Image (cartoon, coloured by chain):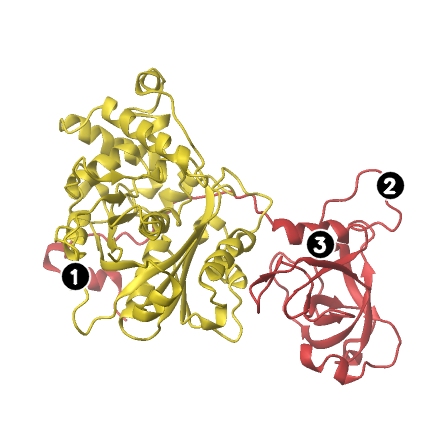
Chain colours: A yellow, B red
Amino acid sequence: MTTRPGPAGRDIAVVAFAQTVHRRSTDRLSEVELVMPVVQDVLKQTGLTADRIGFTCSGSSDYLAGRAFSFTMALDGVGAWPPISESHVEMDGAWALYEAWVKLRTGQADTALVYSYGKSSPGSVRDVLTRQLDPYTLAPLWPDAIALAALQAQALVEAGLADERDFADTAVRSRRAAADNPHAQLRGSAGAEELLRQPYELQPLRRHDCPPISDGAAAVILAVGDAARALHPRPAWIRGIDHRIEAHQPGSRDLTESPSTRLAAIHAGAFEAGASGAPIDTAELHAPFGPQELILRRALDLNSGVAVNPSGGALAANPVMAAGLLRIGEAAARIHRGESRRALAHATSGPCLQQNLVAVLEGDQ
Amino acid sequence: MKTIAELLAAVPELADAEPVTRVVVPARLEYSYSPGAAQTRFLRALTRRRLVAERCPVCTRVYIPPRGVCPTCGQATTDRLELPPTGTITTFCIVNIAARGLDVEVPYCYAYVLLDGAHVGLHARIGGLPHDRVHVGQRVRVVWNEQAAPEHPEGEPPAPSLAAISHFTPTGEPDADPETYRRWM
């Protein structure tokens, strides 16, 4: 699938982004009370009202909420009257954004509202995530998200591709970057030596290699062509976006590599020169576990000239189902602020980087 | 429709396989559900026999139970107000099938009660009269549950619960003018 705009293509941009302050628990708020402020925020940024949004798409998970059709209650925060054109994915909001992008791309709408949210605090997210595994042979073992990430990290170590010091350096850099991000949950870190003196959580992972447990929400507005230019002085144009999935069974994959990220990046045009010839200067990578960032860096050929996760990434705040959309939003916000010319955003889903989405965003001259 | 054994027989490599027809995989997840700020205020007020609603600052509709947001405008419902314990039946049905886990004898009457001043019907049971006398437009009032919402509270308040409202019963007033509830049925 070619995703780059051709002569007949419709250029689509992120024109607004908002997020909550991510916290360990927001038990005083319902989902809709968590989501509504970020939806109101992006509408306010653009001056749009809900009735002027052509398409609305959200991402969330009933397994986190512990309740069926939980997204329908969050919809109250949008104002679905007169009845709106709406869809929902039981996935990270990055995939909701992809669906909205297709809707805009095919000319069915000119503006789209995308939001996603996750409250991990009501249940045990480590256990909840085991329910996405094969129900006959894997889920009965309850291998939680940290155990699976530890298998992946150990495979990296055994392959000689990284060591525990690399993992610690990733955590330190991410959480120190988050010091400038008022929305992040973990803002700052002790030095790598001190981190490496801490006990293992699940060998070879220590606590610093794991994401915080977060409640949070994010919202984005997409717009086409001139509508985008009218809504933001510096739209973050989506030059390409693609997502690829690997086998469901982690045992059938080489966990040290991410070929789905690589393919998605190729199809999103990440390795091609931008319209301006500018190189990718920023990458927002959705790596909930530190070692996964190292795998993604290799899959994406990111060199030291690229600022990786200036927001702090998922190691600084990890609202499940929103953390991927946050990467696209953070990358777009850097372009909006003039801090990036061409940025890559990545989102992941499933165990051990099973499914990956890559978007390339670019600002005008 | 083919049986699993027939389906397996159609694949030569699986012809002799004994089909697994059942795997038992116990799974249990526990959640602490949060009703949120608006519904928390509503549920706590019920234990004191008060009906707390919220009004949308844009369209002025009054919602009960409040959810902190106007679902038609997508705006925070910032104005709080208390509603009287009286209202009008806007629709009802007679339930003859017992719901599993619901401790109510069938048949019972289930209705929307439009509390005076509200713009959405409150789901409630109707009691205190034969079911064939229930009708749309009938005026009703709350009958409180003494355990969940004691009339003269002493000591610790009871746990917040929708059970504070036992049911609604006719007030004996004349039926409401249909113009008062026609828009909110």
Q: Residues within 10 Å of mark 2 (few under 14, many from 20)?
A: few
Q: Position of residue A309 (x, y in %)?
A: 30, 39
Instruction: Name the residue tied to disc 1.
Output: B9
- The answer to which image quadrant residue A101 occupies is bottom left
Q: Amino acid at mark 1?
A: Ala
Tell me which numbered mark, 1 or 3, is placed earlier along the sequence.
1
Instruction: Name the residue tied to disc 3.
Output: B42
User: Which residue extends farthest bottom?
Assistant: B178
Instruction: Name the residue tied to disc 2.
Output: B154
- Looking at the rendered structure, the secondary structure element under dot 2 is loop
At x 30% / y 47%, what residue is drawn?
A350
- Residue situated in front as seen by the camera: B23 or B139: B139
Decide: is A220 above or below B134.
above
Q: Residues within 10 Å of mark 1 (few under 14, many from 20)?
A: some
- The answer to which image quadrant residue A159 occupies is top left
Q: Quadrant of the image for the C terminus of chain B?
A: bottom right
At x 40% / y 57%, what residue is drawn?
A16
Q: Are the numbered discs 2 and 1 placed on the same chain, yes or no? A: yes
Q: Position of residue B35 (x, y in %)?
A: 61, 50
- Please give the chain letter of the residue carrying mark 1: B
Decide: is B12 above or below A144.
below
In space, the residues marked 1 and 3 are separated at their CA atoms by: 61 Å
Q: Amino acid at mark 2?
A: Glu
- Residue situated in front as seen by the camera: A254 or A1: A1
